Each structure stands twice: as structure tokens, then as C-alpha cells.
Image: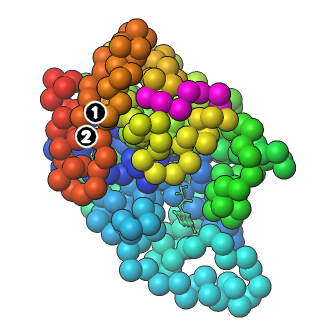
Amino acid sequence: MITILAGGTGSVKLVRGMSSQTRDISVIANVGDNYWLYGLYICPDIDTILYGLADILDTQKGWGIKKDTYGFLRQMEVMGEETWFKIGDRDAAIHLMRTNMLKNGKNLSDITEWMCRKFAIDTKIIPVTDNSVETRIVTNKGDLHLQEYWVKYKGQDKVEGIKYVGADKARANPAAVNAIHDSKLVVIAPGNPLTSIGPILSIKGIRKELSKSKKKVVVVSPLIGGSAVSGPAAKYMEAAELEVSVYGLAKMYSEVASHIVIDASDRTHIRKIENLDMKVHETKIKMNDKKDEDALAQFILKQTHV
Ligand code: FO1
């Protein structure tokens, strides 16, 4: 079995690549950017993996369902609601189902398992916790939910820090802990280290199990040459006072991982990373199409002898 820690639009490509190479895969999904809107519970990272594996993801945007329509949102606008978060009609159906099931007493894990079955997905998608963990961006004007900071206000304000509200009390999903324990390989996908993977690592039970399993944990860099492949990773790393490089990344993960896959253009950092007692593997990490996704997955499996 292989477990992948995933969150955000960068992760889904590797999840897809791995799923086409091997069958028994569990994905531990970030819940820190889940968001309540219009009474609906939206889980962007779970949905991106669901849609990606069901082959209905809008790959241009990296989120939502391809060729979705926006009649629901237009009507919300007519009713005087804010419509900065672009929920498509088909996407809204998923949020509505999930919210109803929550109201009927189901937990997020069971709902997600049910959705995997509905989409005929073999890969297990495991929310890292069934409790609430909220990623909040601390700015010079106060703190905001991640979706408000990034989508509503377009990431304009200066970031002073990042908080995972509720993480200290959240119970790690036992299925996630078991998946890490039972896997022969654990891959930390190339997601934003602070807002996609950070909330997963902020849960004590997960961090502890990863530290114990460190020998089989591989991080895939989301950085190439000191810039994020996509999104605001560099900005958040600066705010967390981390060096914005694959070395800074390796340092951040060195407690929970012993391998790192970096882009060949970052090879100047290899020696420094090796001093952190991490094994470095260099290849082309940017995934532009399915061929790249499969090639990176094959590379990881080969390098780690799985
Ligand atoms: N990202 C945007 O930049 N703009 C949006 O309007 C937007 C809507 C949206 C709706 C549903 C969903 O599941 C994701 C959505 N995202 C949107 C993506 C989301 O903000 C982030 O990319 C993830 O939370 C990062 O993991």
C-alpha cells in the first residue's frame, strides 16, 4: 500500500500519476481550507482529488468540475449575496449532499468514502481528521480564513503568519494513522507546504506516526528554483521565516521525511540537504500532462525501490 498526503491543486497530478501505476493507494486529504458558504460545507482539497480521479476536474483552473455552469451562483447574486467564491452548479450538488449527510449525523470520513463509491474511485480518500481545523492567514490587517485571504481579497495583504485553528484539539483520523503505519511508502505530494500539507502535519497523531515512519516518507518539492510551481507557497514560506528554496523545504520536513525529490535545476542544494540526513533524488518535477504525471510517479517508485 502507498499513502499520499495531499492538498491543493498541485497534489492531484501526483495522486493521478500514482493511481495509474499502482492500485492500493490511500490519500490523506487536507481539511484546513474547508469553508462554510451559504450553509454549504465545501471541502476543496477532498473534491479536487475526487474530481481528478473521476476525470471530471476542470484542469485549467485546477478546481471545480469541467464545463460546469453557474446558474446557482447567478441567482445568489440576484438575491444580493456575495459571489466571489465561484461554485458551479454541479459542484454545488456535491456540497449540498455532503452538508445534508453531516446534518444527518454522518462524519466527513464516511461521507467521503460514500462519494468515492459514487464516483467509482478505488483510491481511498481519508480526511486527515473529522474535527474542524481552519487555516487562517494572519495579515497586517487581522486574520482571515484562507479562502477569504486568497480568493476574496486576492492575497493582497502582507502575510505575518499562518494559524491552524483547532489543530491542537483535533483527533487524527485513525484510518489515516493506520494507512501511514501499514504503507510501504508515504509520499508528501507537491502541495503548498504551509497551507496544504502544514495543516495535516499540525495534527499531533499524524506527525507522530510520520516521524516514526520517517524512513519510508518521501517529499516531492513544489518549488523550482526558489519559486512555487503554482500558487502562493513562496509568500507563505517567507512569512513562516523559512528559506524559500528546496533546502528550506527539506529543513521544514526533515523531522518527518528522509527522502526528497527535487527538480534537476535545484541540484546546487543537494549537499546541504544531505547534511540534514535526507536522501535527494533529482528529476523533472513539473507535471504538464499525463505523461509527466506517470513519469514522476514511476521515478518515485523506482528510486524508493517499491
Ligand atoms: N479558487 C479560486 O481562486 N477562486 C474561486 O472562486 C474558487 C472557487 C472554488 C470553489 C470550490 C472549490 O472546491 C474550490 C474553489 N477554489 C477557488 C479553489 C480553492 O480556493 C483553493 O485552490 C484550494 O482551497 C487550495 O487548496
Residue 242 part of the magenta segment: yes
Tell me how many marks there are: 2
Look at 61% across and 42% down and name the residue there: 235
Compared to residue 117, the image places residue 205 above or below, namely above
> In this figure, which residue is indicated by the disc labeled 1?
264
Q: Is mark 2 within 8 Å of ligand 1?
A: no
Main SS, magenta region, reads: loop
Compared to residue 144, the image places residue 1 above or below, namely above
Q: Which residues are magenta?
A: 240-246
Task: Give neighbour class at mark 1: few <14, some 14-19, many 20+ (Cα, 10 Å).
Answer: some
Q: Is residue 283 left or right of residue 52?
A: left
Residue 143 % position (x, y): 79, 47
Q: Amino acid at mark 2?
A: Lys
Image mark for residue 238: none
Look at 32% across and 34% down and name the residue there: 265
Q: Amino acid at mark 1?
A: Ala
User: Mark 2 and mark 1 in contact (Cβ < 8 Å)?
Assistant: yes
> In this figure, which residue is indicated by the disc labeled 2?
284
Circle 2 — which element? loop
Residue 34 part of the magenta segment: no
